[in-house]
Amino acid sequence: MATQVKEKASASQFEIGTQDHHLQNKVRAIKMLDGVRTGLTILALIMGVSVLGVSADTLQVYNATSVPPGYEQLLPLWPQNFNLRPTVALVVGAAFVVVANAVSVLCSRIAIVRNRSMVHTSQSLAAPFVGLVAALIAMIFFYAVNASDIEDTLLSWTCRWKTLSMVQNPHFGTLCKESWAGLYLTILLIPVEVAVLAVAAYQAKLDKYASAYTYARDTPSPSTRVGSVREEGA
């Protein structure tokens, strides 16, 4: 009889240990996914800063070298029918990407936010979604306006005159490269933000599973409660 009791106890302990091992695997997977998500978020942040930097620089050079109103007698370096909206779209879109990913990285490092599962999950999903939408809108708007044959843009004008050698601003060759760099980085931002969103969604799914699993494991079933009452009554 004593041997049977020992065997039952050992079996029960083995079952609990197996459950703990299963939960530990889930926790390790969650931590790994969190590290991957954070790394991709930092990558998206760096790319957003780069787009913001090169696009803002082209706008700054244009503003510094364009002929102000009232000085039309001077030789203009830029055409009269000029559309800055594609570059402005890249600047605005990159600003949203930078802010969203910076907030996500900061929240991942703040213990109060990390300990609140709902808040942490919400921001980890919201940041890549905002970044993805911003990058998509900026890219679509950029291509839509540049397809026009009526107005020149910073990209079309600077690349048209990129072979022109200049000793001072505007260096059209440099501005052409910066314009293409901003556009290409914005395009590359899209799969990066999609990857961040996918990892964050899977991490949220595992978090939910681990929480439900832990609750179900630690909450006694009705039969267990009945057994406890019977033992106390005995």
Image (spheres, rainbow, N blue to C red):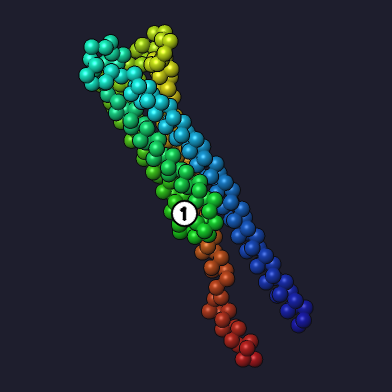
Quadrant where the image shows the C terminus: bottom right
Task: Report the number of discs.
Answer: 1
What residue type is disc 1 on? Thr
Q: Can residue 69 be seen in this view?
A: yes
Q: Is residue 197 visible?
A: no
| Viewer-nearest residue: 98 or 148 | 98
Picture layout, residue 38 above or below residue 10: above
| Viewer-nearest residue: 110 or 135 | 110
Residue at the location (53% across, 68% down)?
Answer: 215
Picture layout, residue 51 above or below residue 64: below
Tell me if 157 is positioned left or right of 106 in this view: left
The residue beneath circle 1 is 121
Tell me if 38 is positioned left or right of 135 in this view: right
Residue at the location (55% across, 73% down)?
Answer: 219
Picture layout, residue 204 above or below residue 3: above
Quadrant where the image shows the N terminus: bottom right
Tell me if 111 is positioned left or right of 123 in this view: right
Q: Position of residue 67 (x, y in %)?
A: 28, 18
Residue at the location (53% across, 53% down)?
Answer: 110
Picture layout, residue 79 above or below residue 44: above
Q: Position of residue 112 (x, y in %)?
A: 52, 58
Q: Please identify the residue farthest to the bottom as the structure is shown.
A: 234
Say what secondary structure mark 1 lies in.
helix
Q: Position of residue 94 (x, y in %)?
A: 40, 35
| Viewer-nearest residue: 16 or 204 | 204
Tell me if 22 is positioned left or right of 71 in this view: right
